[in-house]
Image: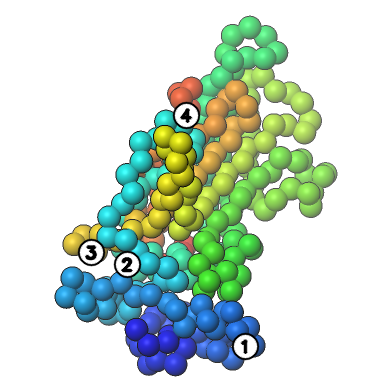
Amino acid sequence: MPCALTSDADYPDYLKSILKEIDAGSDDESKACACSLKTPTTDEGCPITDSDGKLVAFPFCLPTEPIVINYNIQNYATASIGLSYKQAMNIYWKRKPFTMEFKANGVGIEHCSPGERSGKSIGSTSFQCEEVSLKDLVCATSKGGTVDTKYPEYLKPNARKGFTRRSDSCYRSNPPPYFGVIFKIFVPNFKLVEGQYIIERAWIDREAKKIYPVIYVYQNLNGCCGVLGPTNGSTADSSITINCASDKGGTGTVKITDFMA
């Protein structure tokens, strides 16, 4: 396709705004990346558009088949969730805050007395992925964020953005153990399989009109209460829900909303 900065291609308005901002700037690397945007095509070679008739475009190629990997360690797995073309474009390109809601329950071995203990966390936050700049987006650095309230109020601003409530049957210390959540999407995932590194990438199912980004979620209930990794998930018009679990019987969910506005 012609260079996105100089073509009159019908991209979504928010992507046009990004391209206009880059074109008005002086960053040659960002301009080169913007000029290399890739639009997937049909079998007949026609550009693929979303439900609004706007061109789909990313700064990377989308293979038409997934890389199938047998995971032995659940915590390093990724969730295979198909997004509509419009959803995938919105969550990749928009630089607005979105909302993350999360909860988790886990059970582990009791340290302070014989037996087991349980841990529970629930919370929500609205955050923008600070590490993703305009240049990051157009040059194919993916979106991700961390929610971590390891420290109590009196130690802030050392705590990262977010809010959690944590209750354990064992811990009574101050500061209390933390509950952390990491969420990443469209991040190429490096896997060591049988001694070789395999790169898992986002892919497109042209028949189903779905894009499968690499979605990675890590929920930490602090040590023996469990570390939860993604198992599966689902989408609605403006939300993505990722289900998580641990090999100790813990369960959790992470829900991402507001990215379509």
Residue placed farthest to the front in the image?
195
Label 1 belongs to which residue?
25
Depth check: give the residue in front, 161 or 69. 69
Up-down: is 173 above or below 201? above
**x, y percent for residue 256:** 47, 54
How far apart are the alpha carbons under marks 3 and 4?
33 Å
Mark identifier at residue 246: 4
Q: Where the C terminus falls, by quadrant?
A: bottom left
Mark identifier at residue 206: 3
Q: What residue type is labelled 3?
A: Arg
**x, y percent for residue 202:** 38, 57
Label 3 CA crowd tier, 10 Å (few <14, some 14–19, many 20+):
some
Q: Return the disc, 4 or 1, that comes first in the chain's sequence.
A: 1
Q: What residue type is labelled 4?
A: Ser
What residue sits 40% from the left and 55% below the top?
A: 201
Q: Which amino acid does label 1 sit on?
A: Gly
Residue 254 appears in view? no
Q: In this view, does 53 lie to the left or right of 199?
A: left
Q: Return the disc, 3 or 2, that comes first in the chain's sequence.
A: 2
What residue sits 63% from the left and 83% below the top?
A: 27
Disc 2 and disc 4 in contact, CB within 8 angstroms: no
Q: Which amino acid does label 2 sit on?
A: Tyr
Residue 30 appears in view? yes
Name the element at disc 1: loop
Label 2 belongs to which residue?
85
